[in-house]
Amino acid sequence: MKTIHGEGTRTILSGIKPTGRPHLGNYFGMMKQLLGMQNEGQVFGIIVDYHALNFIQNAEEMRELTKGVAIDFLALGFDTEKNVLFKQSDVPEHTELAWIFDTITTVPYLKRAHAYKDAVAKGGEEDISMGTFNYPMLMAADILLYEPDIVPVGQDQKQHIEFARDTAEKFNRIFAGGPEQSEGGLFKLPEEYIMKDVETVPGIDGRKMSKSYNNYISLFAEDSEIEEKVMAIVTDSSSERPENVYAIHKLLANGSTSLTIDKLEEVYRENKGQYKKLKEILIEDLKKFIGPLREKRREVARDTDLVKRVLEEGKQKARAVAGPKLVEVKCAIGVTP
């Protein structure tokens, strides 16, 4: 592995689609994990805009959403001196490697993908784009180019890592034996990292928090949105506590110095059955959590040249890793001498 900061650096990678404002599910499911690992190794944060093209097909909207994700990461404390934040579309090695993976991947295998199955269930095969069908191979390329040790994901993203591992194993098996191959094969097999307490972040309707369900609480929400969304959280009167409220509240307590799990449990015991009051407490705790993040984001957004500079530097750093890796791949498959 060629690293920017020297041999032996542990590599951590994850990506996020620029398809809208990040919500609490995005933060607790992936972003917090990625940011929290910055001192454990080198982090690659990918803004996967080519994946977003399956959903966003308006040029100006794509530019604004992509810029917004970069601002989000910077506001949350992404260290661009040590780590790498970049756009997928700035590194052409991703799409080139995806095509190479296409040639060793079967149609039945790709039909196992959850996104494909969901799309078929919603409207049949006729209107499914090749981008939707084929995205697992582009995602495998996103991951395997950088030989990450671990990939922080939510539980619903676990299949992506399984696909990447399968693809790495198959490539290593088919193209084994060349001079560029190490004993274990050209590609390292990554491991998913799923925090136990955030396998699935519930939305206000009890389903997984998702933009597609419109059941989310924005990570940088204004106070009025926090109040509106929390009061709309679905509750079950047969339970001693509002479970969906508690599940979101518990996420705030994990890793917090002011709101511990023990303290949270005490609050819910003292207010047993008082759902409205517990929602009001969650509202205040969310305001305390989101308020400083929202202000930091506004501060970052005022520096109009910052995002452009960060993404340009990220492109150069990412290509310094992806370029040599693709050269090894092309040598392995025999398209270069």
Image: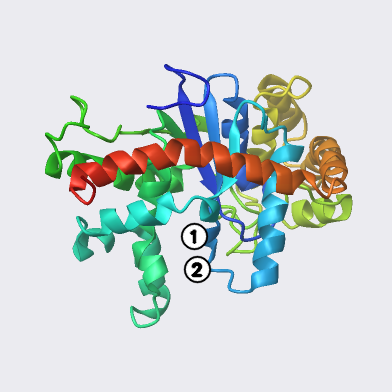
Q: Where does the image place residue 60, in percent across and percent down from the top left?
A: 70, 70
* Residue 139 percent location from the top left of the image: 40, 51
- At a point 22% along the width and 51% down the height, the residue shown is 335
Label 2 with label 1: CB-CB less than 8 Å: yes
Specify whether 213 is left or right of 289. Answer: left
Q: Quadrant location of residue 144?
A: top left
Provide the secondary structure element on which disc 1 rests.
helix
Along the line of sight, the residue nearer the viewer: 308 or 172: 308
In-image side of 266 versus 164 (left or right): right
Residue at mark 2 to residue at mark 1: CA–CA distance? 6 Å
Residue beneath disc 1: 51
Camera-side residue of 323 and 45? 323
- Could you classify mark 2 by the number of other residues whose Cα lies within 10 Å: few (under 14), some (14-19), or many (20 or more)? some
Q: Which residue is mark 2?
A: 54
Specify few, some or many for label 1: CA neighbours under 10 Å numbering under 14, 14-19, or 20 or more.
Answer: many
The image quadrant that residue 171 belongs to is top left
Position in image of residue 50 (x %, y %): 51, 60
Identify the amino acid type marked 1.
Answer: His
Which residue is depicted at the point 72% across and 24% down?
256
- Quadrant location of the C terminus? top left
**Where 255 falls versus 102 (above or below)?**
above
Q: Is residue 190 visible?
A: yes
Looking at the image, the residue that sits furthest to the bottom is: 126
Q: Is residue 315 above or below residue 126?
A: above
Residue 183's spot in the image, x, y percent? 18, 24
Q: Secondary structure at mark 2?
A: loop
Question: Which is more toward the observer, 221 or 315?
Answer: 315
**Quick check: can you spot residue 217?**
no
